[in-house]
Structures are given as C-alpha cells and as structure tokens.
Image (spheres, grey):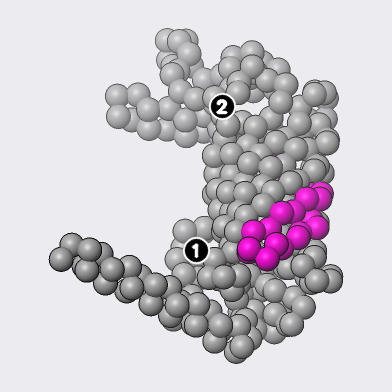
Amino acid sequence: MKKRLLIVFFLFLSYGMQSQVLIALLLGDKLNTGKIEFGLDGGYNYSNVSGFDANKKLSEFNLGFYFDIKMKENWYLNTGVLVKSTMGIDELSMADLALLNATIYNDQSGNILEGTYSQKMSSFLIPALAKYRFKNNVYAEAGLQFSWMYNSWIQFDSNINGNTSRIKEKNKDITNWFDMGVVAGGGYRLLNGYGWTLGARYYYGFMDVYTDISGTKNSAIFLKLNIPFGVGEETKKEVKRQKDLLKEKKAKRKEAKKKNKQ
C-alpha cells in the first residue's frame, strides 16, 4: 500500500513525466526476474555548462526508471531512462546572453528589468554502467551516459515589488540534440541489501552543447534514490525480516537506555 501511495505522489509531483514510466511501473512484476531488477529512479541534480561567465549550478528534480541486470557474481549492468530530466546553467551574465543571442528584457522606459536568466534543457538520459556490489552493500559504478535533448530554452524570472513573471525563449535550434559522456558514482543499499538504494553520480559530457560555440560541455552531480518494484516473494520476505530486525535493535537500545538511567 505504501508503495502505491508513493507512486501516486511522484506522479502528481512530476506532472511532466512521460507515460513510459507509468507503463513500466504497472508492469513491474513482469519486468523483475532473478537476474533483472527494475524500479523507480528519482532524485535531484546540480548541472553546469562550461564556457560561460556564469558558474551557478542549475538545480532540478529528475525521475525515471532503472534496470540492474546481473552479469556475474557482484557485477551488474545498470541502465534505464530518466524521462524527466532538466540540465543547464543558472544566472547567465549579460555577456553570456549576448553570446547566445538571447533577448534581454526592458521596462517601458528602456531600463533593463531585474531578474535572473538561466539556460534549461530537457533530455532523456540513458546510462550504460558497470556496477559492482560489495559485501557491505556499498556499490561503485562507472561507464557512459547518452542524452537525447528534446527541448531547450532560456528562462527569465523576475520578482519586482511582489509581482513575479517568467518568460521562456526557445533556443533548441542552436543546441545539439545528442550528448554523451562519462559517469562515475557510488552508493549504499538499505536493509542489508534488500531495500531502497541511495547514491550519487558525476557526469561530464564530451560533446559541445551548442552547434556554433565550442568549449560548452555539460556536467552534473546526481543525487539519486532507487526504489525496486515487483520483487519476488522471497525478496519481500527478506525485506520484512530485515525491517523486523531493525525494530528489535531499536527496542533493545531503548531498553538499554532505560536500564542505564535507573
């Protein structure tokens, strides 16, 4: 029941999420086998684009699904798709805007409006990583990530005397639709290797973001949470056993504290 509610929460939170995620979640029982683990992949990313005066990272939520495919003992192929993912750079300077031939907004008197400009790009992100799980439930991973950019815009946000405004200027025509780069990361799996997974990844792109501006590379830090779905009955029993063990440990600690106070 908790997992069902969690799915609904993420669906409402991510109104732009593609239908592929919903379909995949509904088929979770079919997708999970003894050698394949399927689940929800979500989190928060801090991204940047090199070659600009601005150096403020753009922070955004991301959401998708993942597959861990067992290759041999402790070795897995990690892949999937982040279907809701936005990367870019925040707080562009006037020089950056001129480089991008972007619109600079003025008031009726011709004065430049106060506000912040950011470059945002929505993409499908597809990792292909080798993952190694250690016996202590820590894992390390490395490999490549491929990106298909399907939307790009410069966003202007202002708040003047409590009046907020947002303007989006599309600039997909000057960006490259494809990117690929290297990824390295690691994390930890909860409940003695049977629960949710917490992790982090670093990505550095090989391709220029813009068609006519060299030296503009994507980079990002991803903080991630993986939630497996449709696991087998044996795994469910083990998860329950691990939770019961945690409850017992907490109860013993409380009892020990009471005895120490007496």
Q: In this rendering, does residue 84 appear at all?
A: no
- Amino acid carrying mark 1 in the image: Phe
Q: Earlier in the sequence, mark 2 or mark 1?
A: 1
Dot 2 surroundings within 10 Å: few (below 14), some, or many (20 or more)? some
Which residue is label 2 attached to? 56
- Most extreme residue toward the bottom is 233
- Amino acid carrying mark 2 in the image: Lys
Quick one: SS at disc 1?
helix
**Is 14 contained in the magenta span?**
no
The residue drawn where x is 63% and y is 63% is: 136
Magenta range is 129-153
Q: Position of residue 177 (x, y in %)?
A: 79, 42
Check residue 10 in the rendering and tell me which mark sits there, or answer none: 1
Q: Quadrant of residue 86?
A: top right
Dot 1 surroundings within 10 Å: few (below 14), some, or many (20 or more)? some
The residue drawn where x is 74% and y is 82% is: 34
Quick one: SS at disc 2?
strand
Q: Quadrant of residue 72?
A: bottom right
